[in-house]
Amino acid sequence: MSTMLTKTCNLHVRLAATTCYNLVRQIGNDLPGWVVDIDNANSYTASWTHRGCFISASVVSINNDESSINFAIRSPGQIFDPFGQLDKMLDQIVQPFQSQASRLQEVERQKQIQQGTMCPKCNKPLPSGARFCPFDGTPIGHECPKCKHVNIPTADFCADCGAKL
Ligand SMILES: [Zn+2]
Ligand SMILES: [Zn+2]
């Protein structure tokens, strides 16, 4: 009977599957000592090998801007991991992925707030042209400092009084 120790980690991120895949590939390919084993852009699956161990990352698209990603480390011939070495090896890819993914998510969030497609307070998607968030009433766009009129997010001047925004 062949033995194999496997540890996994599953993350959910608000990023498109291609973005996640490109990010995880870049991190995995830069891991010192690890060599590319599988790189399948069609199934968003990549794996790397080092001293008989394998790390794999598989991205599943939930929708246009949400994905889940499954990380796994497999060590054939190993049953126990008393020093948590496999977890540490897996963390080499999971931790940079988490920090870079959260940075990219924040960039994406700011972009959507700028475009008026996401509420800055509750982060829910907004119907196009919304002036207020339908979920919590947050004014969307540029509020005029002079007359308090709420302009579209991209406005440079107030549509009501002409003040510079
Ligand atoms: Zn809201
Ligand atoms: Zn105004």
Image (cartoon, grey):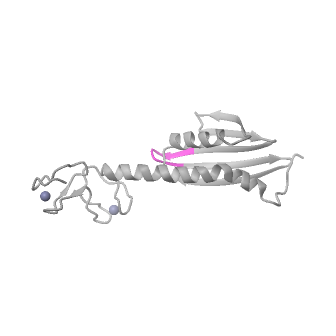
Q: Quadrant of ligand 2?
A: bottom left
Q: Which secondary structure is most common in the magenta stretch?
A: strand
Left or right placement of residue 33 versus residue 152 in this view:
right
Q: Which residue lies furthest to the left in this view?
A: 161
Q: Can residue 134 be seen in this view?
A: yes
Relative height, residue 31 to residue 102 (above, below): above
Residue 98 x, y percent position in the rendering: 57, 53
Within the magenta stretch, is there residue 65? Answer: yes
Residue 106 x, y percent position in the rendering: 44, 53
Left or right placement of residue 100 versus residue 164 in this view:
right
Rendered-image quadrant of the C terminus: bottom left
Q: Is residue 14 visible?
A: no
Left or right placement of residue 143 versus residue 126 in this view:
left
Q: Tell me where the magenta segment starts and ends, as one range.
A: 60-67
Q: Residue at x 65, y 42 (%)?
A: 28
Relative height, residue 3 to residue 36 (above, below): below
Q: Which residue is drawn at 28% across and 64% down?
A: 138
Residue 130 x, y percent position in the rendering: 25, 54
- Please name whichever residue, 19 or 89, is drawn nearer the observer in this view of the structure: 89
Q: Residue furthest right?
A: 1
- Please name whichever residue, 105 or 17, is drawn nearer the observer in this view of the structure: 105
Q: Residue at x 20, y 49 (%)?
A: 156
